[in-house]
Amino acid sequence: MMVYRDNHRTIIWDDKLAGPVDTATQPVPLDECLTLDHHQFEALQAAIRAGRPIRGALVVDRRFDGLYEFSAAPECRASAGTARLFFDRLEYTAFVHAVRHREFERSTFLSPAA
């Protein structure tokens, strides 16, 4: 899983989809991403940190096969995208760990001048 934050948005991408894409020289294909505004991503992080169910722009479902499916809530698909991203338990656990340890804070991603 890759999380990218800039001045306007937070992007979640399954970097296993990368194939031959070199993200250092080519942008990540947005049709393979979920794009949240910062308020939506902060709400997601707050829910995870508080141990509350995840509600809002992002839907996280644990599937029968054990994978975690990330998708946009129906009312947010126009802005967040229609991608469905699948992560195994280890990937999801690593994401939750990173959220709890504040690894996705905006200040981590933005330069001081931003």
Image (tube, rainbow, N blue to C red):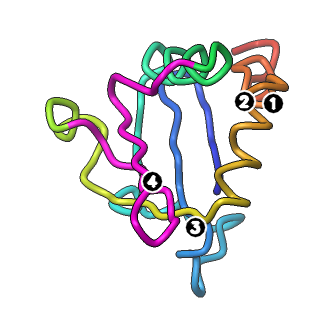
Q: Position of residue 9 (x, y in %)?
A: 48, 29
Q: Which residue is mark 2?
A: 99
Q: Which residue is mark 1?
A: 103
Which numbered marker is on residue 62? 4
Q: Which residues are magenta?
A: 52-73
Secondary structure at badge 1 equals: loop
Spatial CA distance of label 3 from label 4 is: 32 Å
Task: Name the residue at 45% across, 27% down.
Answer: 54
Which quadrant of the rendered structure holds the N terminus? bottom right
Viewed as shown, does residue 86 lie left or right of 79? right
Q: Residue at x 63, y 44 (%)?
A: 3
Name the amino acid type tagged 2: Val
The CA span between labels 4 and 1 is: 23 Å
Quadrant of the image occupied by residue 16: bottom right
**Judging from the image, what secondary structure is the residue with disc 3 in?**
loop
Q: In the displayed structure, would residue 55 be above or below residue 73?
A: above
Mark 4–mark 1 contact, CB under 8 Å?
A: no
Quick one: label 4 or label 2, which is nearer the N terminus? Answer: 4
Q: Earlier in the sequence, mark 1 or mark 3?
A: 3
Q: Residue furthest front?
A: 64
User: Disc 2 vs disc 1: Cβ atoms closer than 8 Å?
Assistant: yes
